Each structure stands twice: as C-alpha cells, then as structure tokens.
Amino acid sequence: MKQFTSVHDVKDIDKLVADALAAKANPFANKKLGENKTMGIIFLNPSLRTRLSTQKAARNLGMETMVMNFGGEGWNLETEDGVVMNGNNQEHIKEAAAVIGQYCDVIGIRSFPSFEDREKDYQEKILKDFIKYSGRPVVSLESATRHPLQSLADLVTITELKKVERPKVVLTWAPHPRRLPQAVSNSFAEWMNKADVDLVITHPEGYDLSPEFVGNAQVTNNQDEAFEGADFVYAKNWSTYEPYGQILSQDPSWTITEEKMALTNQGKFMHCLPVRRNVIVSDGVLDSDSSAAIQQAGNREWAAHAVIQEILRGL
Ligand code: SN0
C-alpha cells in the first residue's frame, strides 16, 4: 500500500480487518518491521485518539515517531499556488511537505475542511499536496472528506460484536451546536458499502450526503423506522452537503436515547468521539453496556497498526 486516504487504497478490507485483530492479539509480533524508520504525525487540527493511537501503533511496530501541531507551533501554511506571499502565511505547503519528507519514512496528516468552498474541500488539495511534495507514503488522519482510520476501527468493532453474519447497520444524523465536517459519515458509509452489512442512513430532510458516499445504502428521513431491528446504531452529526456547510436543524428529537435504542435489535451504540453528551446521545445510552464507543476508540490503535504495517511492507 503506497498511501491510505480512503477505502479505495485498500486491496482487501477483510485482510486488513484480520491484520488489525491479529495485532490486537499480539501487538509486538512485528516490532522489527519499523526498526530505524520514522513516522511524522502532522496535525493542522485538534486530536486525541488519532494522535495517541497512531503513535502507539507506530511504536508497536518499532518505529520512531515525531508529532507536530501546525496550529500555533508551525509556520502558517500557504496552500494556494502562485500567490504573492506578502500576508500572514509564512511557509508554502510545497516546501513544508518536502522538508517533512526529508526526515520521515511515512507521514500521517490531518486537515479538516475549510468550509469556504465545497469544490476545494472535496478536491482534497492539502492531502494531495502532501502526497505530491513529500515523496513519502501518506496516511490520512482525517481529511476534508474522509476519516479512513476511524472507519477501519469501526469495521473491526462491528466484526468483533456482530451476532449475525450480515448485521443491519444504521448511520444516523444527530443534533450538534456547531458546523461539523461530513468526513466521518462519508467515510463510514463508504466502508460499510464495501462490508458485509445492510446499511441504512437516516437524517432530517436537507442533510443528504454526497451520492458517491451513500452508494447502495437505503436512505430515510424516518429515524424510528431506520432503528427497527438495527444491530448497530452509528451516530454522527454533519453539516449539509448541499448547500454546503449549513446547520438546518438542531431538533432534539434526533438525540439517541434509551427509548430510541429500545426500537433496535438490542443494538450497539457507536460514535467516533469526541461526543457531546445529552446532545448527540443521552448519558443513559453512552454509560450503558450497549455503548461500543470506548471499544471503537481502543480499536483505533489496531486499525493504525494494520495500515502502517502494510505501508512498511511496501517500502
Ligand atoms: C470532528 C469531526 O469531523 O466531526 C472529528 C471527529 C473525529 N469532530 C469535531 O470537530 C467535534 C467538535 C465539537 O465541537 O464537538
């Protein structure tokens, strides 16, 4: 694997899930693989799970890690081509990526959408420029449109917890006070389209995701109907795709409660975290045995492990 930016970079997702579960059972089996190799872990936005799980995974594989936050610590990055750099941005992404590539064998990068221009966000310019100018394999640590390490951890968690061969998986919108990216939801839908599950997406009117991510999922604006018989309920807020980046609803009737979970087939609640308690999900659900959120977060380490391992094998 030369890069990990979406499910489309993965030849065999079942094998990647199996690799993640094997790493979980035996974390240090491949400690020699990354010896004398360095992973640069670069953040243009905040992070808890991604930062720690990626470092942990790289170290389990014997790598050195260097973490850098650009917000506040790095120079302000210029990402436009051909600009006269006489403003506040001190360093161009062309040099920044190329220099990081001098020090690192593998690079992870997080860059959220700017929400200024949908075309630009969906073109993934920052991620693509890092691939182009660093000359190194690049792992997405959440880009403008996707969060593939999260989605892989989600699939690992579903694999561990499923009670039927082909579970019903519901991706549900839930309210939130801020304008959030579509990345986690897009990516989850994209991975579930490739997995052996029945995917239903439910959201209020006006919150349709881009069709390229919805794929073959069934879509409904009736959350209660979607929850019937669900084995997994994956909650996430996202802002609108069309028109881009709007908050159309904060309807509290979409919050995931114990009453809603009672409609499911003793379903498991899932969320990528961080989660706004009693906005996205009630305390009762999040603190119950039906919540898989902490297990998902734990599986981030094994998802990162499987991906970095595959990249190291291709070096
Ligand atoms: C990010 C998102 O893409 O939705 C990261 C999720 C892994 N989440 C947030 O930015 C939440 C921030 C908030 O205000 O709750």
Image (cartoon, grey):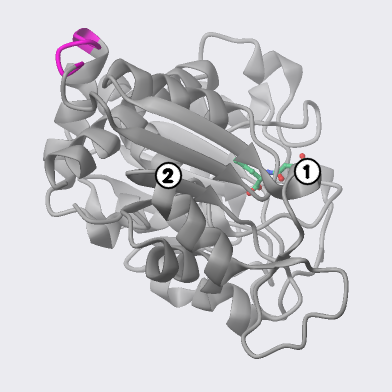
> Does residue 267 appear in the picture of this structure?
no
What's the residue type where badge 2 is placed?
A: Tyr
Instruction: Determine the residue positioned at 28% across, 36% down.
Output: 308
60 or 268, which lies in front? 60
Label 1 beta carbon within 8 A of ligand 1: no
Question: Which element carries disc 1, helix, strand or loop?
Answer: helix
Instruction: Determine the residue positioned at 33% across, 31% down.
Output: 303
Q: Quadrant of residue 272?
A: top right
Instruction: Determine the residue positioned at 52% across, 9% down.
Output: 289
The label nearer to you, 1 versus 2, is 2
Q: Which residue is mark 2?
A: 103
Whether residue 69 sits left or right of residue 137 in the image: it is: right
Ranked by sequence position, the earlier of labels 1 and 2 is 2
Q: Where is residue 228 drawn, in percent x and y?
A: 47, 39
Question: Which element carries disc 2, helix, strand or loop?
Answer: helix
Instruction: Determine the residue positioned at 57% across, 60% down.
Output: 96
Magenta: predominant secondary structure element?
loop
Q: Which residue is mark 1?
A: 253
Extent of the magenta region: 25-31
Q: Can you say whether 60 is above or below 81 in the image? A: above
Q: How many other residues sit within 10 Å of disc 2, few (<14), some (14-19) or many (≥20)?
A: some
- The total of numbered circles placed on residues is 2
Q: Where is residue 255 drawn, in percent x and y?
A: 73, 38
Q: Can you say whether 256 is above or below 144 in the image? A: above
What's the residue type where badge 1 is placed?
A: Ser
Q: Can you say whether 224 is above or below 268 in the image? A: below
Q: Quadrant of residue 275?
A: top right
148 or 41, which lies in front? 41
